[in-house]
Each structure stands twice: as C-alpha cells, then as structure tokens.
Image (tube, coloured by chain):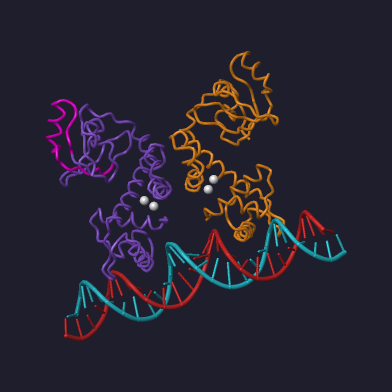
Chain colours: A orange, B purple, C red, D cyan
Amino acid sequence: MITESVEEYLETIYRLYERGVATTTTNIAKELKVAPASATQMLKKLAKQGYLKYTPYRGVTLTAKGKRTGKEILRKHRVMEKFLGTLGIPKSKIHKEACELEHHIPHDLERAIYQKVEGEKPLPPGAPSDVVPLTSLLDGQKGVISFIGGGRGASQRLADLGLTPRTEITVIKSALFRGPLLISVRGTTLAIGRGVASRIFVRAK
Amino acid sequence: MITESVEEYLETIYRLYERGVATTTTNIAKELKVAPASATQMLKKLAKQGYLKYTPYRGVTLTAKGKRTGKEILRKHRVMEKFLGTLGIPKSKIHKEACELEHHIPHDLERAIYQKVEGEKPLPPGAPSDVVPLTSLLDGQKGVISFIGGGRGASQRLADLGLTPRTEITVIKSALFRGPLLISVRGTTLAIGRGVASRIFVRAK
DNA sequence: TTTAAAATTTAGGCGTGCCTAAATTTAAAA
DNA sequence: TTTTAAATTTAGGCACGCCTAAATTTTAAA
Ligand SMILES: [Mn+2]
Ligand SMILES: [Mn+2]
Ligand SMILES: [Mn+2]
Ligand SMILES: [Mn+2]
C-alpha cells in the first residue's frame, strides 16, 4: 500500500521536476518542510520501491513509475483546488486543504468531481475526441492548440496574439467559471477572457 | 492536535451510544476491527484527554466533550455519504470513502458541500428558523415535527400515518434527490415519498 | 461455592516517519 | 592545493497506533 507520505514526496518531486528545479535532497526537504535527514531516509525507501533512482550526495531522478504517480497526485491536487474554489472556500485555505484531500480521493471520485466542476463542455461537431476547450485545463497544465472555434474574426484576433494551431500553451492560473485565464505562450505571459478561451481547443499534454 | 484515530474511536463510540449498545472495550474493538488490547490502550488515552470516563473492566462513558466530537465526525460522515451519492459513486464504496473523507473535511467545507447537496430549501413564510424540511435530514438523524406545509389534505393524510406535530421521526435512509425516505415513527418503519417529505417541517435533534 | 469460560488488561514488540547531533562528502574560497 | 563552508548521510531516539501472548478480573455454569 502506498502511504500518504510517499504520495506527498512523489508529488513534490514531480512538481520540482516539472518546474525544472534540481531534485536534490535539500530542495525536496525544504519543499516538504522536513529535515534533510528525514528526506534522505525516505528517498532511499522510494528508490527501493522503484519510484526513483537515488545516487548518494547527488539527488534523485524519477522513474516512469515515479512520474506517473507524482503526476496523478498533482492532478488530484489541482482538481480539488478547482472544486474548493467553486464552493467559495477562501483562497488562503485552498492550497492546504487540496493538498490534504488529494490523498483521500479515489480516482473515480476525482473524475466525478471534475465532471461536476467543469460541466459538460460541448465540442464543435467533428472535433477530435481528445480535444478540450482551454478552459478545461487545470493550473499548470500544458496543451497544444488543435483549432480555434468561432468565426474568422476570432481566429484572426487570436493569431495576432500568437495563438495558432500547434502552439503550446501553459495555463498558469485559471479561476473557475469567472475571470480571465493567465497563460504562457512561447515564454510570454498573457491574460485572455474566458469567452475566447472556451473557443481555443487544445490537446492536453 | 486530534488525530484521525482519536476521531475514529469517538465516532464509533458515539454511534454505539446512539444505538444504545454498551460501550465496552470489546464492542468498540469489534466495531473498529482492532484487537481488544489496542482499544484498551486508546481508551485510556481518550480518558486522559477528557473525551470519556474509563473504568477498568467496565467500559466507558462519553463526556460532553466526547459526545460533541463524536457527533461532529458522524455528521461529517453522513454529509459525505450524501455527497458521494449525488456524484453517482457506487453504494458499495460510499460508506468506506465517506469514513475516510470525514477526517479531512474542515467544518466550513462540510457546510459548503451540504449547501450544494441540499440546495436552498425555501421555508414557508413565518416558519421558525430552526426548522427544516424532513428531506434535509441525514441518515440516522432524528427530528421532531414542527408543522406540516401544504393544504388541509396533506395534513390529513399525514395525520393518518401518525405524522402530527411533536411526533419524533428518525430518518433511516434518505437517498438524495430521488426515491422515498425510509423513516421510523414510534417504532414503526414507513416509506414516504420525497414530495410529501419536503412538506413535513421538523426541528432537527 | 467452586470452577470454567469470557472479557479485559499488561507486557513486549513492530513499522512508519519525524527529529537532532555528529560524521562524512562535495563544492567553493583562499 | 589547502582550507572552509555547505550539503548530505549516519546514528540514536521518539510518538503513534497496531499486534500477539500472557496475566488478571469478571461472569456464568456446575
Ligand atoms: Mn498533499
Ligand atoms: Mn498537494
Ligand atoms: Mn472514519
Ligand atoms: Mn465514519
């Protein structure tokens, strides 16, 4: 059985990895607010369980298994944050509560909550089924633009912003249901309204 | 800090107390699927922390503090069960998942979810504010009938069933949003439709 | 009332994950 | 290259909550 602690470590390491921060004992310990000695201990254990490769004094590298697990917890974390947001829980508490709940939400419950929170976003007829509106992505998720819905006008305005098919987008912040999305495109950060965002269809990465 | 284990024990003991079952070491251990020796250990600890009175070889009695805490966890459990039900989580998993989540849901989140799940049930004008429709009660909750909404006809039909003001009702099973409620009145179990149930206004106990 | 069975407690241990203090190793400065 | 500082690991301990086996106490049967 995978413990809550193991999940927490893997989520943290995956987050560092995603951000391009070195996955060293100290960084991990700092992120988790734990003594370095405690991290060392756990990292050895995670290595033994095949979640990562551990080289003494050199830090760790997630294995495929480790990445898969870390990513999954992080996704639960983000779904829970969105959910708590829709319920009007104060921002100051959202991160912490999501980070606790993420360990107690089985996969199907996560899916159910996600559905609830996102509603059923109808796709334009004929769209590939692995494509979703940009508004469906969670904070931190990346996607590649598949196509732009709506008329020529919309396409043109978005093209002016550099938002054309095959462009990679990272969602920085996407408050739920209201307010603009903060996205990052080719190193530039920009804010776009929810209306337009719902007409940008992406393949989530 | 109150641990998850402490919560689990208090919830269990409170449930036994509510059901009128003796709160002995063995019963508690059995309910929690734990060895009697483990229960003994914990019961001593709970006594030391003021949640209950412990008499060796004789079992325990919850203090006011213990009742308050046990009741609170049990309420969270019930709210989560309703919530999971609305999300379409299979019945077979609901109890277990609720019993895990109950320990990770702060009070305001519980309230928010409860609101979401119940919707805002409008009360008839002039009704006392501590009164709610019977459909708002959770499984296992008791309430005392305050008044019957709707016309004379409704009142008469319900009176025939013995449902008159000041009658105590225990909700046995209340699936969410659909299906009849199973209730217990003066030792008799009966099923009533949601429509009528929403016109029976009770003071929750 | 004596005896056997059931309930409960005591004793000794285990696994998990954390901590501090003391090595040890690696990196940076002189 | 030697010395010092920073990072990391090792060692020894602690709190929790669980378990089994062996007492002890209570209850029920004879
Ligand atoms: Mn977490
Ligand atoms: Mn988290
Ligand atoms: Mn529980
Ligand atoms: Mn429970």
- Percent from the top left, x then y, of residue A126? 58, 21
* Residue A190 occupies quadrant: top right
- Percent from the top left, x then y, of residue B111? 36, 39
Q: Nearer the viewer, residue B146 or B31?
A: B146
* Residue B157 occupies quadrant: top left
Q: Is residue A105 magenta?
A: no
Q: Is residue B178 above or below residue A32?
A: above
In this picture, residue B164 sits left or right of residue B84: left
Quarter of the C terminus of chain B within the rendering:
top left
Residue for point 54% across, 39% down? A78
Q: Is residue B133 above or below residue B100?
A: above
In this picture, residue A69 sits left or right of residue A93: right
* Residue B84 occupies quadrant: top left
- Percent from the top left, x then y, of residue B41? 37, 67
In this picture, residue B62 sits left or right of residue B146: right
Q: Is residue B166 magenta?
A: yes
Q: Which region is colored magenta?
A: B145-173
Q: Is residue A103 above or below residue B87?
A: below
Quarter of the N terminus of chain B within the rendering:
bottom left
- Percent from the top left, x then y, of residue C12? 46, 77
Q: Nearer the viewer, residue B23 or A12?
A: A12
Residue for point 40% across, 58% down? B5
What number of labels is visible?
0
